Image (cartoon, grey):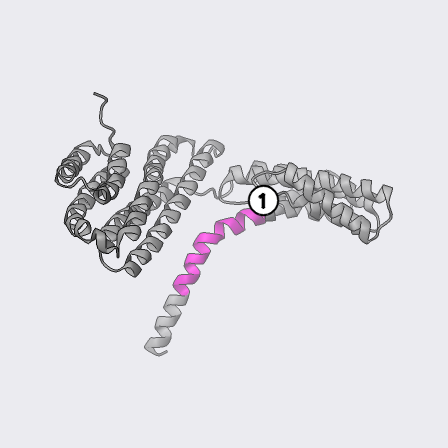
Amino acid sequence: MSSASATWAGKSGGRMRKIVATDGPTVARILVTAVAGWQVALWLGADQPPVYAAVVPLVALRGDPLTALTLSFQRVLGVVAGVLLGITVLNLVPPSTASLALVLTASLVLGMVLRAGGLNLQVAVSSLLVFANPSPDAYAFHRLWETAAGAVVTIVLAPLLWPPNPRRILPDLAEDCRTRLLKALAGSVAALGTEPILARENLAVVTAHCAAVRDAAARAREAERLMRFNPLRRRHRAEVRHLGLAVETADRLIPHVSALALEVAAFTGRADLAPVLADARPRLAELAVLTGEAVEHALAGSDPRPAAATARTALSAYLHADSRPAAVALRRPFQHILDDLAPEPAS
């Protein structure tokens, strides 16, 4: 085997191992839960293959058991509403294009009302399946109770089967947030007063960083919910909460970081502001470093106040040196970041 082929095989194997490590537990959870749901439905007296009991884990299981609970409830609610709607329409009018439109309209309206995190399309799916079935009454009965059985099995097993470990996820999320915030601050200062296109490109990069931090914050909140619904991880609640606070802090700083990038994009390229921007660049570069140190302390869980005090000194010196409106706008995001990390005591 040539070196190129060996390299390609090594990379492919590495990607496959990563995929298996990421998706393998989810696949195993779905498989075990689907088989368990099927078997429970058989024990309860199913006289036909209980497919609907096995379908629930396919659509409901996610990394967060709370999500599995919500989606299972959503599916059962949608099935009940859709089946009842389909039977009602069929008892009133024969199958036709007009009755199909009626079923779809009513089911989508119900899906907006019976929502659980979004439009409940299960109502429309179930009503259409009843509508298209040659034996709607028998179909409706089996679909209702088998779906309910599958949902109960999913809710019971979801927190117990290969649950994700928030203690392994959150440190990486916090580190990623820290890196993105510092890059956003440094990048905005570096783009100030250069070329308008560079400032706009920086704004796009900072916007992407902000979106990633917001996504990390949502995942951190999901991880904390996981601790409440997973008996196997309850002893780690305090540690997970501590790690989650770092990501929450990063999420709070996002509006200020974004505001700085917006101001830089707005001011860069304006000839009338060239003197202000030339004076601002060295001061903001120092301020970005000092403020970044406060951010690092806060996200690491240590006291950010000493670093914030040093940054405030530099900010105060800049304030006394330049009171022009553009300078005020450029340093305001740093003021907000420091106020968020270490509020000054009321005088």
Instruction: Return the residue found at the far top.
Output: 347
Image quadrant for the N terminus? bottom left
Name the residue tied to disc 1.
Answer: 60
Closer to the camera, 326 or 38?
A: 326
Please indicate whether residue 288 sits to the left or right of residue 145 in the image.
Answer: left
The quarter of the picture where residue 313 lies is top left
Asked whether residue 125 is drawn in magenta, I would say no
- Residue 77 visible in image: yes
Instruction: Return the residue found at the far front.
Output: 272
Closer to the camera, 34 or 249?
A: 249
Is 89 drawn above or below residue 7 in the view shown?
A: above
Closer to the camera, 210 or 62?
A: 210
Q: Which residues are magenta?
A: 13-33
Q: Residue at x 39, y 48 (%)?
A: 211
The percent coordinates of residue 87 (x first, y second) are 81, 42
Dot 1: within a 10 Å radius of its alpha carbon, few (fewer than 14), some, or many (20 or more) residues?
many
